[in-house]
Image (spheres, rainbow, N blue to C red):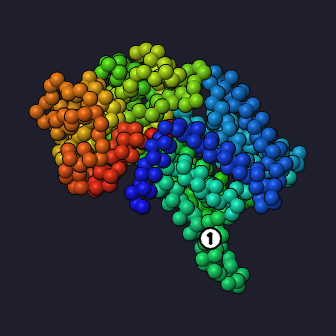
Amino acid sequence: MISSLTAAWNRLFAVLGRVSMYRLVLFSLVSLAVISFVISFFGVLAPTPLDLLASYAVLAVACTVTDAVAHRVLRTSWRWESTLITVLILLFVLRPTVDPLALGGIAVAGVVASASKYLLAWQGRHIFNPAAVGATALTILSIWVPGLGSSAWWVGSPALAGPVLLLGLLVLLRTEKVRVVAVFLVIAVAVALLRTASQFQAAGLEVDGGSLFWQILWSSPFLFLGAFMLSEPLTLPPRRWQQFAVAVVVGVLAGWPLTIGEITIGQERALLVGNLLAFVFAFRSAVRLTLVERVVLTPTVRELVFRAGRRFRFTAGQYLELEVPHPRPDARGTRREFSIVSAPEELPTVRIALREGSQSSYKKALALVEPGQSLAVTGVWGDFVLPVKTVSPVLMVAAGIGVTPFVSQLRHLRLSGEDRDVVFVYVASEAEELAFRDELEASGVPVIVFTRNEPATLPPHWRWGRGARLDAAALVTMVPDIGARHAYVSGPPRLIAELAPALEKARSLTTDAFSGY
């Protein structure tokens, strides 16, 4: 039973890894909107079907026009997925209606939300969640214009709790933010439970803790707020401990809203406070890089060498998000994530590597960047970093271009003089595709190579695994002390799925997964 569940989980993880983050979030929100529209006919939701249709139409027009104008003025390409995601989140946050004045308020919220993506941004990175900005603006305006509408968070309904939980879980699994949002949920529900129980006791009412807990969990918007808004990578800080800190702050403020004048710090305002804290954490990681040269590493892998405009902080193993503006980008847009190949000690030199062959609009645009041109790094993220204790034995498993974060870590170890017990497993299609051989050899760590053809020559501390396929049994055979090591795996999700039975034996497992935003 356990093995079948593990196999099913591994298959799900592999499938999710092939879907871009924008597409998965959009699919989940569209599915939730369809479910909401269908069950609204049975009167189990606050809005009626007509309310939903009218509000969606107004939001779609407002956000589409604003995005179109902004892209025309800024001469950038339009990402329709981003527009639809903003529309759908606002649909679930605001109060759907057919009242003309309230629909005008909804239109204002849509315009402000979309405009915030361009006006409240830093180095191409959102400072605040756009939908939260739009909802907050409407709340403030409604103080002076009664009847303009407000946020309602009608998505926090028991009828939608199941779909929100399941669809949100898909998003969180893909972004690997399950633990962060779980912390938020625990804090928010606990604080809300404490607040509600104290109010009941003050009113002389009896408190049933169990029933109150489930009512808060299923009837509050916490599930939606955490899964579809708090989890947005562009408004989260770089390190996991920082993300936990943001989750705690948002959880406390969402669970026990504070009143400031005529404004209550509700769900969206709590998120804005968390966004601001995240921006403070990430502020120093935005930088501009000037291309110096391209280096051919293998027949398909190229290394790009940049010079940073200023020093910035990163830890070996982290990745940066590089923006390459270009006309008519494909569905994945103008930004991509790349593991940093160079070590922190090599700054201001920054190196990344990529595999050629993709026909994406981004790769084509990046290929046209000439030495001397500068590009924006919107931030540095990731917890794919070595254990704090240097005495902890480590297993590194890389497939193809997944070697890059390990090169940064091994360079750091060599340049800093830090001594660690490391075993490196390297999977490539052909021996000729083993990139960074010189760097790996200079590190002195034992390397086990899996390629279809046997490499012509291997350093004394290298071994050929005899065959390109690395599975769980082969990994245990080649690394018999895997149970004593902290395992780090960088490669496609299917590799992690195939190695799962062996990796479960390791002391810990850390995977290098990008959000795809």
Q: Residue at x 66, y 32 (%)?
A: 80
Q: Residue at x 67, y 49 (%)?
A: 32
Q: Residue at x 58, y 66 (%)?
A: 189
Above/below status of 95 relative to 83: below
Residue found at the far right of this picture: 100
> Relative to residue 299, is residue 20 drawn left or right?
right
Above/below status of 139 relative to 455: below
Q: Using the image as rendered, state which of residue 239 and residue 153 is in the foreground.
A: 153
> Relative to residue 271, is residue 458 drawn left or right?
left
Looking at the image, can residue 482 be seen? yes
> Relative to residue 460, is residue 394 drawn left or right?
right
Kindly identify which residue carries mark 1. 214
Q: Quadrant of residue 195?
A: bottom right
Image spot of residue 320 (x, y percent): 42, 35
Q: Using the image as rendered, state which of residue 215 and residue 113 is in the foreground.
A: 215
Image spot of residue 365 (x, y percent): 50, 19
Q: Amino acid at mark 1?
A: Trp
Q: Residue at x 39, y 46 (%)?
A: 497
Above/below status of 245 relative to 337: below
Q: Quadrant of residue 152?
A: bottom right
Image spot of residue 312 (x, y percent): 39, 36
> Relative to residue 424, is residue 334 drawn left or right?
right
Looking at the image, can residue 315 be seen? no
Q: Quadrant of the N terminus?
A: bottom left
Image spot of residue 158 (x, y percent): 69, 63
